[in-house]
Amino acid sequence: MTGAWYVLTAGALTIVGQIANGKTPAPRIIIGAFAAGTGLVLLSSAQPTIARQLGALILTTSLLTSGADVARGVISALN
């Protein structure tokens, strides 16, 4: 999985977490995920290992900040 896919997944987790909290996702999340993903695509042509590690760091940060909200939203949707 490339770094850009990690960033795309992180952006989706953040958006789902905000929806689960009853908030409208901010446009800056979408713009930021697009900009970071584009940057990692460009970086991956020169340094694929670093791009993958930065993408994994961004995904880990998203899981730590929005993961609980996503889990609550999934649990409430299943009940």
Image (cartoon, rainbow, N blue to C red):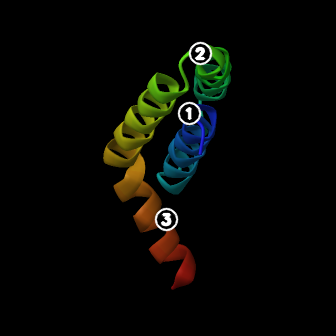
Q: Earlier in the sequence, mark 3 or mark 2?
A: 2
Between the C-alphas of marks 1 and 2, the distance is 9 Å
Dots 3, 2 in contact, CB < 8 A: no
Dots 1, 2 in contact, CB < 8 A: yes
Residue at position x 62%, y 40% in the image: 5
Q: Give the amino acid at mark 1.
A: Gly
Between the C-alphas of marks 3 and 1, the distance is 26 Å
Q: Element under label 3?
A: helix
Q: How crowded is mark 2: few (under 14 residues within 10 Å), some or many (20 or more)?
A: some
Judged left or right of residue 70, residue 2 is right
Residue 73, numbered label? 3
**Residue position marked by numbered label 1 in the rendering:** 3
Q: Give the amino acid at mark 2.
A: Leu
69 versus 50 height, above or below: below
Q: Which of marks 3 and 1 is nearer the N terminus?
A: 1
Residue 78, numbered label? none
Q: Element under label 2?
A: helix
Q: Element under label 1?
A: helix
Depth check: give the residue in front, 42 or 27.
Answer: 42
Quadrant of the image occupied by residue 39 = top right
Q: Which of marks 1 and 2 is nearer the N terminus?
A: 1
Judged left or right of residue 12, residue 63 is left
**Residue position marked by numbered label 2 in the rendering:** 43
Q: Nearer the viewer, mark 3 or mark 1?
A: 1
Residue 79 image point, x, y percent: 51, 85
Dots 3, 1 in contact, CB < 8 A: no
Residue 35 image point, x, y percent: 64, 17
Residue 53 image point, x, y percent: 42, 32
Q: Give the amino acid at mark 3.
A: Gly
Quadrant of the image occupied by residue 9 = top right
